[in-house]
Every structure is written in structure tokens, then in C-alpha cells.
Amino acid sequence: PIFGQGPGNAKRLLSERSDELIGIRFGYSHYHDVFLNYAVRDGILGVLIVLAMILAPLILAARHRRDELGTYGFAFLAGIEIAFLLAGAIGIMFGQDIMDALFMISTITGAYLVFGATPAGELHASSEPGLAMRSGPV
């Protein structure tokens, strides 16, 4: 469905479907795949929102001119996003306090390194695409 089954219905749905398929009622609280979990709970819109939370910072950072520190920030941001995608493929990516806080703090830190570490006026073109150098004395 487009809008999903709603919050709190995953356990009931898992139990009903497992009983129909194999005759045993499982009592899991969630699906062990973040995209399947959000697809069942929130529908297609939920999956698109989670994808946007992961991909938007990466796409914006990839398109932004950056210096050497910004390149490190982009690598940090990409590493965090990949780690969360891998964690979400086998468990819960969001919905736990420590995971949510880690995602927010890491994304903000990576975004600061890419977008806020050096004012755009101090950057000049480099021979590498997406990489700029600081102008003036170091």
C-alpha cells in the first residue's frame, strides 16, 4: 500500500502472515530490514523519506565545491551513510536513541566539514572536479 499499515501494526501483521504461511505465530516487533520495515509501516512514502534522509546529504555534499577538509568531511559523511545502510539491511537503522543520535551528530559533523569549514569566497578552482583549494596563506 501507498500509506502502509500504520505504526504499531508490524507485530500483528508478522504474526498473522507467519501463521498463514507456516502455521507458527512469530512475535517479532519489526522486520529485520529497514526498507521493508518502513514499507510495511509507512508505505512507499515512508521508504522515500528514509532514502531522502540518507541520500540528500550525500548528493548535496557531492555537488558542493570543497577544499581538502571538505573532502575529508565528504568521505566521513559517505562512510557514516554506508554504515547506516548496512546496519539497516540486517536490523534497525533508526528508532533507537543511540542510533538516532549518532546519525544526527555524524551527519551534522560531516555536513559542517563539507559546507561550513571554509567560506565559499576563500575557495578557488582546482584541477580535480569537486575539489577546491584555499586561497591565500595557510
Image: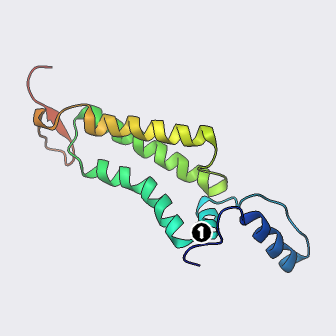
Left or right of 109? Residue 80 is right
Point 21% across, 31% down: residue: 118
Point 91% across, 71% down: residue: 24
Count up the numbered dots.
1
Residue type at mark 1 is: Ala
Q: Is residue 31 above or below residue 93?
A: below
Disc 1 target residue:
39
* The quarter of the displayed image where residue 98 is located: top right
Q: Position of residue 95 (x, y in %)?
A: 62, 49
Point 84% across, 61% down: residue: 27
Q: Quadrant of the N terminus?
A: bottom right
Point 58% across, 63% down: residue: 35
Circle 1 sits in a helix, a strand or a loop, which is it? helix
In the image, 77 versus 125, the foreground residue is 77
In the image, 13 versus 136, the foreground residue is 13
Render colour scheme: rainbow
Q: Position of residue 58 (x, y in %)?
A: 36, 51
Judge the density around disc 1: few (<14), some (14-19), many (≥20) Cα neighbours within 10 Å: many
Left or right of 22? Residue 88 is left
Q: Is residue 138 above or below residue 11?
A: above
In the image, 77 versus 96, the foreground residue is 96
Q: Quadrant of the C terminus?
A: top left
Q: Position of residue 129 (x, y in %)?
A: 19, 49
Left or right of 54? Residue 61 is left
Q: Position of residue 100 (x, y in %)?
A: 56, 43
Q: Residue furthest right?
A: 23
